[in-house]
Image (cartoon, rainbow, N blue to C red):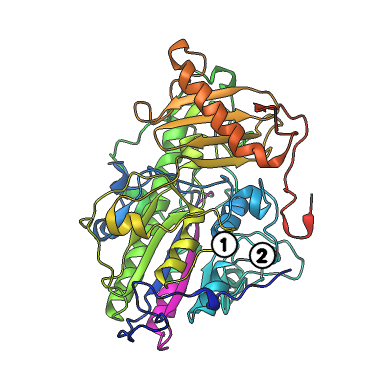
Amino acid sequence: MKKYNYVGWCMAGSLGLSAMSGQAAQPEKKQPHIILIMTDQQRWDALGCAGNEAVISPNVDRLAADGHLFCNAYTAAPSSTPARAGMLTGMSPWHHGLLGYGQVAEHYPYEMPQMLKDLGYHTLGIGKMHWHPQNVLHGFEATILDESGRVESPYFMSDYRKWFNTQAFGLDPDSTGVEWNAHEAKAYALPERLHPTVWTGDRAVEAIKGYSSEQPLFLKVSFARPHSPYDPPRRIVDMYEGREIPAPVVGDWCKDLAIDAHPEKNPEAAIGNYGVEYARNSRKYYYASVTFIDEQVGRIVDELKKKGMYDNALICFVADHGDMLGDHHLWRKTYAYEGSAAIPFIIKLPESMKSSLQPGEKIEAPVELRDLLPTFLALNGCRIPKEMDGLSLLPLLEKGKAPWREYIDIEHSTAYWADNYWCALTDGKIKYIWFFRTGEEQLFDLSKDPYELHDLSKVKASGKTLEKMRKAMAGHLQERGEEWVKDGKLVIRNRNLLYSPNYPTNKK
């Protein structure tokens, strides 16, 4: 596979990391640390700063108040592996090659940790990576893994599980009894210090506390929750007693999904009407899991401040995808709808960067996980490779406005059932969904209907908007050939495709 000289692309930028030939040398500013905090399966509205008064998240809310919350942020493919591949490479699903829940490739031409390492960063990954092989580094100098019980090799054991066996030998780390994809909820059955959320927070705090290098630090901290099992400690569940937990929303388009279900028989079902109280209980424990993570984020931020690293750090808080939590009778992820595809996305700038925005000011432009790597490169004065689909967020963060993309593209290959195979376009105000196998369409006005209660695709007054979005989708898919778009029209497909021809080694 072709290798690239990342360092050679560095240009003189606002940080003064290099000087242009013929110009007087400028005092160099210190490269900022980059702290990337990621959660697994956290939906966009599961934060207080996102307007959800039911969620207790004071530490992440303070981070948003110091920085900026992106109000229209998305994952490109709403399941763990394709979302993380997009963040790793700065590319869209078609271009990095993983269109659904498959395997992140072992090597890519562009990889976030490697590119930052080449720019002089010390690179460390902690928590859930969800890569294959599981101990691949992608440029990290070290990873300390919590793979959430996921074992893809008989010879692999995550660092969390090894640690657990040294701390509580003879106990069962899964003794709470909730499966990894279940939406039932229980309080953690073991001492709180043994929970993987605490373990990940502990490892991050220790890494920051012990950091003594003159190199800038790239630290990725990846929590395995609030992804199921929804298993926060009892003390945090108790914090939600008496709070009004929102019921799931149900659109006027999803009557066929209202399958009567029995949680005791199938707590891992992707579809089903389990009733409002069951869904509210799942949400309570899910929100409590968010609060549990929030405590760890507070510890990480406090340690950065104690270490004198906070002011010179670009700090990001994101998720790989969301969780439907019973909205429209759907559970988990892989859907085009906001609960699954929209994510929290917060960035706090280093103090050396000037911005016309006020701290805490929200940004409306549509952004996506693939924008993080270009942002980190631009932060260090580097040219963004033309092969990357992501955009640097710095113009938005510095000025609030910039020439920007019209739409975010989102897609996912078939999951849970055959027809759940789709591509969507959205600008955060309008969303168009094209289902490849059936030719069905959906159109939502997110500015008036943020929870997608009303499908406008069959509303006569929406005809012009629908046609506009069809044309935009055809333009987006055009490069894939006549199996996808023919004579300017979208083509119904009867064949699923998990890996595009661009997947490394061309696995199909």
Between residue 7 and residue 131, name the one nearer to us. 7
Type of amino acid under label 1: Leu
Residue at image location 47% in from the left, 40% down from the top = 407
Between residue 223 and residue 406, name the one nearer to us. 406
| Residue 204 among those drawn in magenta | yes
Task: Please say if 280 is above or below 346.
Answer: above
Type of amino acid under label 2: Tyr
Quarter location, residue 182: top right
Residue at image location 58% in from the left, 45% down from the top = 77
Between residue 250 and residue 363, name the one nearer to us. 363
Task: Please say if 60 is above or below 117.
Answer: above
Report x, y in % for residue 465.
46, 22
Residue at image location 44% in from the left, 20% down from the top = 454
N-terminal of the pair, mark 2 or mark 1, is: 1
The image quadrant where one finds the N terminus is: bottom right
Residues under numbered marks 2 and 1 in contact, where contact means CB atoms less than 8 Å apart: yes
On residue 108, the disc is: 2
On residue 88, the disc is: 1
Whether residue 240 appears in this view of the structure is no
Which residue is the extreme one toward the left? Answer: 358
Report x, y in % for residue 37.
43, 63
Report x, y in % for residue 316.
39, 61
